C-alpha cells in the first residue's frame, strides 16, 4: 500500500499542464486524499480562484514552498 506524498491543507501546483498555460502557475490546496486508481494515488484539490474542486493524480503535482514570512510562529 502506498503512502500519500502530500497532506490535506498543503499547497501544490499542477505539473501536467503545459508550462505556457495559466493553470501551471496556479496554486491549489489539497482538500482530500483519495484512494489509488490504476496504481497511482489521487487527490482532491482546490484553488482559491475557483468555485469547483479538481481530482488529480500524485504524479501530476509538485509541492509549493511557502515563503517563511507566510508561516505562523
Image: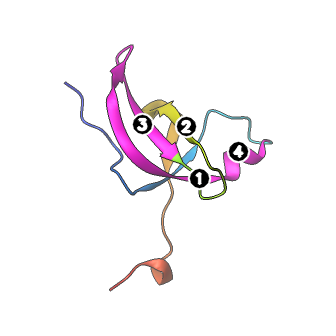
- Return the mark for residue 47: 1
Nearer to us in this view, 10 or 53 = 53
Q: Residues within 10 Å of mark 1 (few under 14, many from 20)?
A: some
Badge 3 is on which residue? Answer: 43
Alpha-carbon span between mark 3 and mark 4: 17 Å
Numbered disc 3: secondary structure: strand
Nearer to us in this view, 12 or 33 = 33
> Sequence-wise, which precedes: disc 4 or disc 2?
4
Residue 41 among magenta residues: yes
Identify the image quadrant of the C terminus: bottom left
Q: Residue at x 68, y 35 (%)?
A: 17
- Where is residue 57 shown, x and y percent of the image? 46, 30
Numbered disc 1: secondary structure: loop
Magenta stretch bounds: 21-45
Q: Say whether marks 3 and 1 touch (CB < 8 Å).
A: no
- Where is residue 2 shown, x and y percent of the image? 24, 28
Badge 2 is on which residue? Answer: 54
Numbered disc 4: secondary structure: helix
- Where is residue 19 shown, x and y percent of the image? 74, 41
The chief SS type of the magenta part is strand
Amino acid at each position: 500500500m502506498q503512502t500519500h506524498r502530500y497532506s490535506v491543507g498543503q499547497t501544490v501546483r499542477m505539473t501536467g499542464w503545459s508550462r505556457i498555460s495559466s493553470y501551471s502557475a496556479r496554486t491549489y490546496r489539497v482538500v482530500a486524499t483519495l484512494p489509488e486508481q490504476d496504481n497511482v494515488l489521487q487527490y482532491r484539490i482546490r484553488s482559491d480562484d475557483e468555485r469547483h474542486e479538481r481530482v488529480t493524480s500524485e504524479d501530476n503535482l509538485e509541492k509549493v514552498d511557502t515563503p517563511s514570512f507566510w508561516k505562523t510562529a
